[in-house]
């Protein structure tokens, strides 16, 4: 994980009451915490700091009380990283658990306020204009928790690996995932050139990667689950495709250089990401300026109550599920990432309950619970999925899926 941003300089013994004064602790509103970040030292700081900026401090940063709100305030304000000569131990632990990038250097970093510096969390280094500092490298298990976005997100990702590992073969036979018309439509809308290099993140069994392979020079598919990659590799071998490779990799922490790909895609996986903003940020980062970002996923209702009910059912079926989003929210994430949407195409996909529940394989008790809940939703369409029975008495529903194709500004990188 490399983080580059503008430095804000602070001294020694910055305590948690200075980071977020105690009078604001009666709320759980993270925006309130962010709006008063470091008010105890600089009352104007929250209004001046920008997303991705870096706090550079001296010794004993985060001393005082054990309040985790201090970490939450820093993270919610969009601080990219906190670098300090030393951290108070409880603050350090809270930062790792909540997923705030930090680096302990053992010495005070010499740099100017506003100077752009670069942090390499994995290697434990800080690069300023004229020097590279070697900090303390975290133990692998702590760094993994931190890079996953904190302890809760880390456990969620471990659940994803476990569940998708067990169900990888079931996903390879899914009629929806393997739908050639849908795959062709996605690639048609992306309109790649023959010379293009494509990255398909959370590739699963590689359905979209293989579809791109017929039309471009090179495709790399990556996925967090080794078993998924192994199946994709087997299929690639059977198809004798020389221009496709697969790598085990987290979509929220891509191991590629900036501007490495002409097209970056993600199909039917976004609802499993614990940090969707980070995933989009990584997709944008590794895409060339003027390149294409493609996101395909199921949608949830614009009606908040229906969306909540729908996602509740999804989590019962599959605990690794995070959230399916309304279309307006997905498009908002794209706009926030500086992307210009050039195509939006909705595509309805009918799912029969038995196939849908079978892919997840949750066990008989959960199957019956989900079936009853889906049937109970029919009367007033509580899920927004048009749950119904066909003429043969089979339970089915309709997912509205979205294909979003966006362009990264030509002036936004390589």
Image (tube, rainbow, N blue to C red):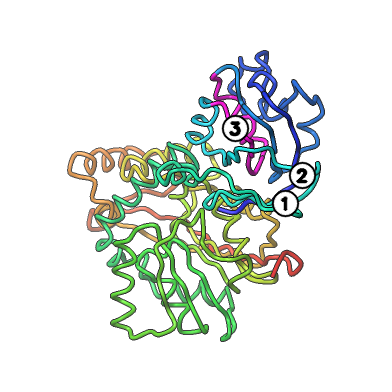
Position of residue 347 relative to residue 47, above or below, is below
In the figure, is residue 221 to the left or right of 366? Answer: right
Mark 1 and mark 3: span between their CA atoms? 18 Å
Local secondary structure at mark 3: loop
Q: Residues within 10 Å of mark 1 (few under 14, many from 20)?
A: some
The magenta segment: 66-88
Mark 1 and mark 2: span between their CA atoms? 7 Å
Q: CB under 8 Å between callouts 1 and 3?
A: no
Q: Earlier in the sequence, mark 2 or mark 3?
A: 3
**Percent x, y for residue 48?**
80, 36
Residue 351, image quadrant = bottom left
The magenta stretch spans residue 85: yes
* Whether residue 327 can be seen here: yes
**Percent x, y for residue 380?**
42, 39
The magenta stretch spans residue 394: no
Local secondary structure at mark 1: loop
Q: CB under 8 Å between callouts 1 and 2?
A: yes
Q: Which residue is mark 1?
A: 128
**Percent x, y for residue 382?**
42, 39
Q: Which residue is mark 3?
A: 86
Along the line of sight, which residue is nearer the eye, 95 or 73? Answer: 95
């Amino acid at each position: 994980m490399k983080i580059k941003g503008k430095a804000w300089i602070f001294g020694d013994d910055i305590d948690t009451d200075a980071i977020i004064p105690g009078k604001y602790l009666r709320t759980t509103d993270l925006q309130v915490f962010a709006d008063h970040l470091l008010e105890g030292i600089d009352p104007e700081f929250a209004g001046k700091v920008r997303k991705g900026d870096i706090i550079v401090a001296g010794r004993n940063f985060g001393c005082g009380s054990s309040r985790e709100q201090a970490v939450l305030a820093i993270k919610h304000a969009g601080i990219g990283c906190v670098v300090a000569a030393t951290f108070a131990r409880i603050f350090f632990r809270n930062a790792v658990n909540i997923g705030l990038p930090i680096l302990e250097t053992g010495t005070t970093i010499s740099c100017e306020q506003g100077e752009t510096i670069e942090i390499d969390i994995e290697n434990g280094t800080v690069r300023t204009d004229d020097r590279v500092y070697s900090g303390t490298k975290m133990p692998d298990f702590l760094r993994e928790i931190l890079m996953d976005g904190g302890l809760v997100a880390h456990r969620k990702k471990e659940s994803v690996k476990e569940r998708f590992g067990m169900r990888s073969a079931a996903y390879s036979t899914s009629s929806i995932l393997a739908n050639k018309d849908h795959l062709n439509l996605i690639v048609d809308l992306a309109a790649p050139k023959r010379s293009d290099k494509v990255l398909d993140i959370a590739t699963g069994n590689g359905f979209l990667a293989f579809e791109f392979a017929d039309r471009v020079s090179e495709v790399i598919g990556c996925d967090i689950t080794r078993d998924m990659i192994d199946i994709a590799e087997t299929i690639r071998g059977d198809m004798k495709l020389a221009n496709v490779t697969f790598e085990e990799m987290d979509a929220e922490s891509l191991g590629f250089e900036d501007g490495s790909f002409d097209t970056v895609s993600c199909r039917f996986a976004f609802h499993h990401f614990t940090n969707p903003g980070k995933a989009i940020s990584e997709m944008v980062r590794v895409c060339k300026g003027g390149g294409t970002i493609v996101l395909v996923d199921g949608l949830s209702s614009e009606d908040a109550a229906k969306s909540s009910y729908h996602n509740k059912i999804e989590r019962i079926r599959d605990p690794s599920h995070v959230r399916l989003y309304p279309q307006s929210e997905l498009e908002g994430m794209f706009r926030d990432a500086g992307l210009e949407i050039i195509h939006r195409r909705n595509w309805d996909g009918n799912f029969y309950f038995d196939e849908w529940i079978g892919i997840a394989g949750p066990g008989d008790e959960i199957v019956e619970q989900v079936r009853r809940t889906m049937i109970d939703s029919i009367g007033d369409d509580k899920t927004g999925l048009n749950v119904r029975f066909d003429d043969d008495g089979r339970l089915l529903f309709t997912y509205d899926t979205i294909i979003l194709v966006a362009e990264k500004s030509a002036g936004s990188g390589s």
